[in-house]
Image (tube, helix red, strand yellow):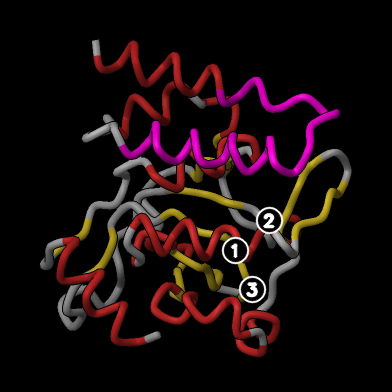
Amino acid sequence: MADKFHKNIFTTIALGLPTNITSTTIMAARQWFRETAQKITSVNLSHLFEQNAKNLVNDINITSIGSMFTFHYDPKWKDKLPYWDSHPLIFVVELYSDGFLGINLHYLSPYHRAKLMDALYTITLKEKDMMKVQISYSVLKNASKFRLFKPCLKRYLSSHIQSRLLFIEPSQWDMVLMLPLQRFVKASEEVVYRDSAGIR
């Protein structure tokens, strides 16, 4: 029953929104997406990847900056980390020869994720029929409305990604943002959210 429920939600979101809508309608739709997603208490990650197989990619490249992805991750320095998210949900910010910098939204409570996401929506652009966030570390650092990003900024090594990367379509951002995809290791969500609140 739960899997059927998840499937119906993702089908609905994947249909996207009509082009002749007002900003009020968009905000109402986002709110509905978020409230609906928060009612889901668990998600089968393998099932999620299977359902969206057409959006699986092998690596991050220059065209990925400003896009949202999720994947399985095993950090290189996990023995020294107080905790980490083994299933990040990130916007790619910068690329490196051995990986990339990303904003992992899971490090924020659902309420603060929504606030940061609303701020990020103010710097989106449409590129080749695909919406992206016009994002860079300097933009984040210098604009007070993005201050929530600080505990979310994480470096990811390509060699420690343990799955293909699932590209999240912009029409699904708000839904996936609120799904309980986070898998924190060595700490509870409550501890992570409390620590993140102290970093901002």
**Residue at (60%, 77%) from the top-left corner?**
145
**Residue at (63%, 43%) from the top-left corner?**
27
- Residue 146 lies, in percent from the top left, at 58, 76
10 vs 4, left or right, is right
Amino acid identity at mark 3: Glu
**Residue at (38%, 35%) from the top-left corner?**
37
Q: Residue 186 sits in which quadrant?
A: bottom left
Residue 173 is a magenta residue: no
- Residue 105 lies, in percent from the top left, at 43, 61
Alpha carbons under labels 3 and 2: distance apart: 9 Å
In the image, which disc is placed on residue 94?
3
Residue 36 is a magenta residue: yes
Packing grade of label 2 (10 A; few <14, some 14-19, many >=20) is some
Amino acid identity at mark 1: Val
Residue position marked by numbered label 2 in the rendering: 64
Between 26 and 15, which is closer to the camera in this rendering? 26
157 vs 72, left or right, is right
Q: Quick one: SS at disc 3?
A: strand
The answer to which of marks 1 and 2 sits earlier in the sequence is 2
Q: Decide: is 195 above or below 121.
A: below
Alpha carbons under labels 1 and 2: distance apart: 6 Å
Amino acid identity at mark 2: Ser
- Residue 185 lies, in percent from the top left, at 16, 62
In the image, which disc is placed on residue 92?
1
Which range is magenta?
13-38
179 vs 78, left or right, is right
